[in-house]
Image: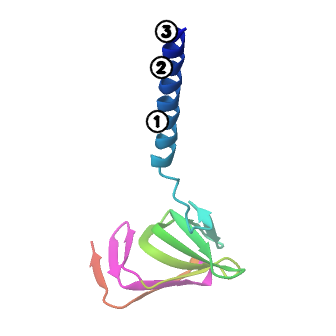
Amino acid sequence: MIISFIIILFFAIFIFFKQNNINSKRIDEKPSKLSNTDISEPKFSINNDTQKIYITAKEGNFINKNEILLKKDVRFKSNDFSIETENVIFDRNNQTAKSKTKSLFKSKNTSITSDGFDINEKGNKIVFYGNSFVILK
């Protein structure tokens, strides 16, 4: 009878420690980080009569109904050029874009680094702002 009691007691202690170990692992697990991003990896395009400009980014947040703040690795790419920057405000209705962060424009024979840019007239007009450095090949 005593041996049975010791075996049952040993088994109960073993189960208690196993359950306690499992519970401690659940507490140690870090909860997944919730993002403040409205759109993950957004993709848009600006369409005009002669070309399409594709826009990609890592994150996007709605500013209002038409404007979206694109963040992290924002890229504008067409057959003729590409622009890379970190933050852009994109207007979906007017198909315009504005950036006040360092930007790099690349085309076949030209590269431009600037402190920002505006894309207007559905991509037909790009204005670079701030300190700009132009390389013509």
The residue carrying pointer 1 sits among few (fewer than 14), some (14 to 19) or many (20 or more) residues within 10 Å by Cα, namely: few
Q: Which residues are magenta?
A: 101-122
Instruction: Confirm whether residue 98 shows in the render.
Output: yes
What secondary structure characterizes most of the magenta part? strand
Residue at image x 49%, y 71%? 71
Badge 2 amino acid: Phe
Marks 2 & 1, CB-CB < 8 Å contact:
no
**What is the distance, in whole Å, between disc 3 and disc 1 at their CAs?**
27 Å
Residue at image mark 3 = 3
Residue at the far bottom in the pictured view: 130
**Compared to 35, does 14 lie above or below?**
above
On the rendered structure, is 23 left or right of 68? left
Q: Quadrant of residue 86?
A: bottom left
Q: Looking at the rendered structure, which numbered label has been put on residue 10?
A: 2
Question: In the rendered structure, are the residues bearing label 3 and label 2 in contact, judged by CB atoms less than 8 Å apart?
Answer: no
Q: Which residue is mark 1?
A: 21
